[in-house]
Image (cartoon, grey):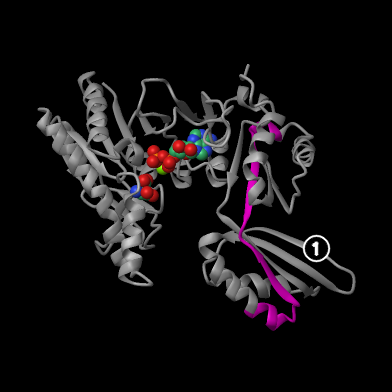
Amino acid sequence: MALRVQKYGGTSVADIDRINNVAGRVIKAHESGDQIVVVLSAMAGVTDGLISLANQASPRPDKRELDVLLATGEQTTAALLAMILKFRGYKAKSFLGFQAGILTDQTSGKARILDIECKKIQDAIQKGNIIVVAGFQGADANGDITTLGRGGSDTSAVAIASALKADVCEIFTDVDGVYTTDPRICEKARKIKRISYEEMLEMAILGAKVLQIRSVEFAKKYNVPVHVRSSFNEEEGTMVVNESSDMESVVVSGVTCDMNEARITLKKVPDQPGISAKIFTPLANAEIMVDMIIQNTRSGGETDLTFTVTKDDFERAKEISERVAKEVGADEVLTKKEIAKVSVIGLGMKSHSGVAATMFQALASENINIRLISTSEIRISCVILAKYAELAVRTLHAAFNLDKERQ
Ligand code: ADP
Ligand code: ASP
Ligand code: MG
């Protein structure tokens, strides 16, 4: 008998028909003799709708109350699925995050899971129940409701799988698995059978929203086998697993695109020691994460300093940059929100050269200008104008032979 954690995302529970479909799948798994813990998202669009209501209630919704509100999306689906399972004659029990023992830190809106006290769930499993847990939420040490950030039900599922030492964590979604790039952008995208935690983590960080970043960090740290698959068919999906030697033979395994960043440039900054610290310390103090940083030296003891932040942090980062620009005597602050970061990712880059050159040539062949570049051991990212994003993804997908079946 295996213990399986199954997570169903927003489109998979979008209405009662689909929740009934989920119930059917859960019952089938239960009937096969496995113990099943289901983790659910809110119905598609519900979290967005709740955020919009909160913004109508207050221009700056109180963070504690916002978490209380957002958690209701998952509360609804968990209760509905448990009701359906019971109606169909099965023993089932729903749990909100705090009832499932999910303890988080106090960062409202993007809390981290610190611990899971899963005795209640274990007892309910032993009594033969199908367990249904509301994803995306927990409670902090004061008992206040917290949420885990957008896409957070993935992390709830992996964390619960880890705490229960489940045999597998199945992420059921609206695609058949993890693809070489977003199948909505590139019709030639192909399903990857097995991908390493490391590559999956880079893909998530760089914009492939199929798994939340923290869920992959968690899976990697605690060695949770994750199976990403469709909730609408029975096909095998993608296994996210530890790196194996054969994986390094693939130079590039995926292409991603992130439209969620914006660019800020401080023009003609005095080229002196300590200036970068003066610019980036206030941003850090405001808890703004800076991603790419580039400094171009001009003649005459001045430089241009460019960096990117997420669009959510853009307005605050711009305000701070304008203030600091005056203090340090920079010329002006220029900004651009319509940018995209396209990236290629692959373990094989560790041992192959020429990947950057191929990437730059491919973009050049379509006359796409590269504004910023950054690299790590297993990825290369280029910032380009947003209007070229989809073309760039398709071009890179072809340039690295991802359109073709992997041998
Ligand atoms: P869920 O609601 O089930 O959590 P998400 O919308 O969060 O689903 O994630 C699934 C979506 O991720 C897909 O519909 C797909 O468009 C997108 N996606 C982006 N990049 C990839 C990729 N490389 N492989 C698969 N899906 C991807
Ligand atoms: N409902 C939340 C969201 O839309 C969490 C999730 O779906 O994983 O972000
Ligand atoms: Mg998701």
Furthest residue in direction top, as rendered: 407
Magenta residues, start to end? 323-349
Magenta-span inclusion, residue 338:
yes
Question: Which residue corresponds to the image point at 59% horizontal and 40% vertical from the top-left?
Answer: 256
Q: Quadrant of the N terminus?
A: top left
Q: Is mark 1 within 8 Å of ligand 1?
A: no
Residue 113 coordinates in the image, percent (x, y):
36, 52
Q: Quadrant of residue 94?
A: top left
User: In the drawing, does residue 350 fall left or right of residue 49?
Assistant: right
Q: Amino acid at mark 1?
A: Asn
Q: In terms of depth relative to the viewer, which is nearer, 274 or 298?
A: 298
Q: Is residue 291 above or below residue 129?
A: below
Furthest residue in direction front, as rendered: 387
Q: In terms of depth relative to the viewer, which is nearer, 123 or 204?
A: 204
Question: Which residue corresponds to the image point at 69% horizontal and 82% vertical from the top-left?
Answer: 326
Q: In terms of depth relative to the viewer, which is nearer, 376 or 380?
A: 380
In this rendering, the count of numbered labels is: 1
Q: In terms of depth relative to the viewer, which is nearer, 297 or 376?
A: 297
Q: Is residue 79 above or below residue 325?
A: above
The secondary element bearing badge 1 is classed as strand
The answer to whether residue 117 is visible is: yes
Question: Which residue corresponds to the image point at 30% horizontal and 29% vertical from the top-left?
Answer: 4
User: In the drawing, does residue 14 fall left or right of residue 196?
Assistant: left
Residue 117 coordinates in the image, percent (x, y):
26, 47
Residue at mark 1: 296
User: In the drawing, does residue 84 fall left or right of residue 398?
Assistant: left
Please state the quadrant of the image where ligand 3 appears: top left
Q: Quadrant of residue 170?
A: top left
Q: Quadrant of the C terminus?
A: top right
Magenta-span inclusion, residue 60:
no
